[in-house]
Image (tube, rainbow, N blue to C red):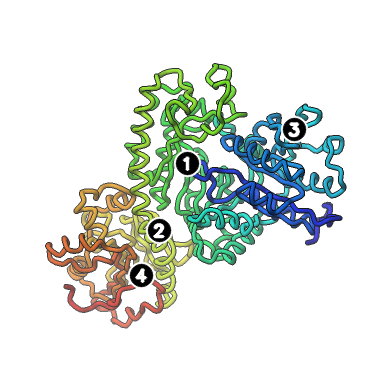
């Protein structure tokens, strides 16, 4: 590796030092990072990049590190896992090597260094740990040499010497990509049911200062990687984990800057990763715009998480500051619905100044948006050390003197969790919390059952069908296509496609018309067809009313529930292959070709038996129909496109001119 101009090149160590990195967790509590510690993955890769000859091992048990016999041990801990970290440190003392504490707790509380540790790192650990490693290599790991290392807290003669926070790394592209093989190795070995879940950081830091959140205490300054660095990491993930399709972007706020998002999305699409991966990210409701939603859709973001916290504007202002309101929540949920992005909502109950009315407002908001929220999480207001919520609770005498940090796990359990509220009693809160958790279970169970099909629909509408339309336009030589729709079409920016509302005039330059679910969304489809120029071919995309899952929802009385039900409620008309043909025939069109888009959703045999009682419906596995209709005077050879040309998952009847069953 060549060091950038003005930076020191990596220096080899005099000895092949071994660095053990320990991630402590019980892997059962709600905040358990069963995804692995990305922070330790960064540190492992950084040390190998900057200190050639250094050996690094990531472990999830002290016993594993004792067997490996490292020269230096770094332990990462949250506040709720600090007790485990101290127990591990006492166990590792027998190795007689320096023990360094890092992670969110030290970053939020630089002075709180437990006596079991020789030193701690407050803030980003890469540069600090490298300096410590250099000292160790020179046999100089002693207090007088630790002095002056910004971000390093250390012990000297029974005193804790804190030296502030580590300076934020400004050029994040200097960092090596996380060493995921080491990050996952211990978890694969130690957790029989472990399956790698991929997270990436495209940026560090958060500019907001929410009163309950420790994230800005860990990384207070927002900086970001270049698109090229992110693409290189995605390439590495694609090589190392060929079976992985989901990637969670763990930035505190992914949608903070539109221009940066534009560059990143352009790079992801140019590399083809919008077809390789589905992404999950976080946003803030007052920063998300229609243009940003369009960008998120174009990079294939399946779900966006929002920190709604509460539906009470007064309480949100206290928790998050000015700038965020309930009207923003309604707006971003509508935006997600419009762009086919699923929304996850995070809420907090039990805040110190929350009233019973605030709780009722939040419950009513969730109830009102049951179909716009794909999933939710209700957390108990948890005072993390270092946050304003902790300070205010401490001043009010609400923090027990001998608090067991293990209860700081975002969940409420009466008798052990810290109860902060000053406006209602714990009996009321216990029942309210149970009601919120009931909502959470209902929503999340529904999403988990639907998610495979929702992913399939997203892939079809965002990738497969636009690709098919572009191929068809190319094959037929269409230079301008009028695309009529009352919703987002997910088509890429292309001068050939002119997007029009259902009541717009078709320009004389158009050579074909596409009806993108347009007939489904009007009360009188005959009127819409009658307005079209009669000399143009018409390609109509429609939902299939005979789709198995639609039947299931009807039979279960759940037609209006869930994300799929919300999509269907936009429709004013429903079509089958037969009724669609009949409609176009009545308007003087002939059938050119028909493509039936097959779903991978597996029918339940019991439901199939029940459906057989109503006449053995056809096309149960077809979720959508693409039919090309031609004016009676147009030669039929225009319809000569085939399944091989489209790349779509089609039925065997792609040219179904035969009578329908």
In terms of depth relative to the viewer, which is nearer, 122 or 552? 122
Disc ID at residue 164: 3
Q: CA distance from mark 4 to mark 3?
A: 66 Å
Query: In the structure shown, which secondary structural element does the residue marked by tag 2 occupy?
Result: helix
Residue annotated with mark 1: 306
| Earlier sequence position, callout 3 versus callout 1 | 3
In front here: 545 or 389?
A: 389
Q: Quadrant of residue 552?
A: bottom left
Q: Label 4 vs label 1: CA separation? A: 41 Å
Residue where numbered disc 2 is placed: 455
Q: Residue at x 72, y 43 (%)?
A: 94
Looking at the image, tell me whether mark 1 or mark 2 is earlier in sequence order.
1
Of badges 4 and 2, the one in the foreground is 2
| SS label for mark 1 | strand
Label 3 neighbour load within 10 Å: few <14, some 14-19, many 20+: some
Tell me: residue 503, above or below residue 364: below
Give the residue at the far top of this rendering.
396
């Amino acid at each position: 590796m060549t060091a950038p101009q003005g930076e020191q090149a990596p220096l080899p160590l005099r000895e092949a030092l071994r660095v053990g990195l320990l991630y402590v967790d019980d892997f059962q509590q709600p905040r358990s990072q069963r995804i692995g510690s990305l922070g330790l993955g960064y540190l492992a890769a950084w040390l190998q990049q900057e200190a050639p000859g250094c050996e690094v091992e990531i472990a999830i048990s002290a016993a594993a590190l004792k067997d490996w016999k490292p020269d230096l041990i770094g332990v990462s801990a949250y506040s709720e896992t600090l007790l485990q970290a101290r127990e591990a440190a006492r166990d590792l003392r027998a190795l007689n090597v320096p023990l360094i504490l890092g992670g969110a707790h030290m970053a939020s509380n630089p002075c709180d260094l437990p006596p079991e540790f020789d030193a701690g790192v407050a803030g980003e650990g890469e540069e600090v740990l490298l300096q410590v490693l250099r000292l160790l290599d020179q046999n100089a790991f002693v207090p007088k040499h630790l002095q002056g290392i910004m971000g390093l807290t250390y012990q000297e003669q029974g005193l804790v010497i804190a030296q502030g926070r580590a300076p934020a790394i400004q050029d994040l592209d200097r960092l090596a990509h996380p060493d995921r093989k080491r990050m996952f190795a211990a978890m694969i070995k130690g957790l029989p049911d472990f399956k790698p879940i991929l997270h990436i950081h495209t940026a560090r830091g958060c500019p907001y200062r929410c009163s309950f959140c420790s994230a800005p205490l860990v990384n207070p300054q927002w900086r970001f990687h270049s698109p090229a660095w992110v693409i290189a990491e995605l390439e590495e993930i694609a090589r190392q984990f060929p079976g992985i399709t989901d990637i969670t972007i763990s930035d505190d706020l992914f949608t903070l800057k539109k221009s940066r998002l534009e560059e990143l999305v352009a790079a992801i699409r140019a590399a083809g990763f919008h077809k390789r991966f589905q992404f999950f990210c976080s946003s803030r409701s007052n920063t998300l715009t229609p243009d940003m939603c369009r960008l998120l859709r174009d990079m294939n973001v399946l779900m966006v998480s929002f920190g709604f916290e509460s539906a009470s504007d007064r309480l949100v202002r206290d928790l998050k500051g000015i700038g965020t309101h309930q009207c923003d929540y309604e707006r971003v949920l509508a935006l997600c619905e419009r762009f086919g992005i699923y929304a996850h909502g995070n809420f907090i109950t039990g805040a110190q100044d929350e009233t019973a009315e605030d709780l009722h407002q939040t419950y009513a908001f969730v109830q009102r948006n049951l179909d716009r929220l794909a999933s939710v999480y209700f957390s108990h207001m948890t005072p993390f050390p270092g946050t304003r919520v902790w300070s205010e609770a401490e001043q009010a005498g609400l923090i027990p003197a001998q608090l067991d940090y293990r209860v700081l796990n975002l969940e409420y359990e009466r008798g052990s969790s810290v109860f902060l509220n000053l406006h209602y009693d714990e009996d009321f809160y216990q029942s309210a919390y149970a009601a919120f958790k009931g909502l959470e279970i209902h929503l999340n169970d529904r999403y988990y059952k639907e998610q495979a099909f929702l992913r399939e629909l997203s892939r079809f509408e965002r990738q497969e069908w636009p690709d098919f339309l572009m191929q068809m336009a190319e094959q037929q030589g269409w230079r301008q296509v009028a695309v009529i729709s009352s919703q987002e079409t997910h088509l890429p920016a292309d001068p050939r496609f002119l997007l029009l509302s259902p009541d717009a005039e078709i320009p004389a330059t158009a050579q074909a018309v596409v009806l993108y679910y347009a007939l489904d969304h009007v009360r009188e489809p005959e009127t819409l067809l009658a307005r079209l120029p009669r000399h143009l071919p018409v390609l109509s995309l429609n939902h299939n009313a005979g789709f198995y899952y639609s039947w299931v929802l009807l039979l279960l009385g759940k037609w209006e529930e869930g994300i799929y039900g919300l999509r269907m409620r936009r429709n004013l008309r429903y079509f089958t292959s037969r009724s669609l043909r009949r409609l176009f025939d009545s308007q003087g069109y002939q059938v050119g070709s028909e493509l039936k888009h097959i779903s991978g959703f597996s029918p339940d045999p019991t439901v199939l038996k029940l459906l057989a009682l109503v006449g053995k419906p056809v096309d149960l596995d077809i979720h959508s129909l693409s039919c090309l209709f031609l004016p009676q005077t147009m030669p039929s050879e225009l319809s000569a496109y085939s399944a091989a040309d489209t790349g779509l998952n089609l039925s065997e009847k792609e040219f179904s001119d035969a009578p329908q069953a």
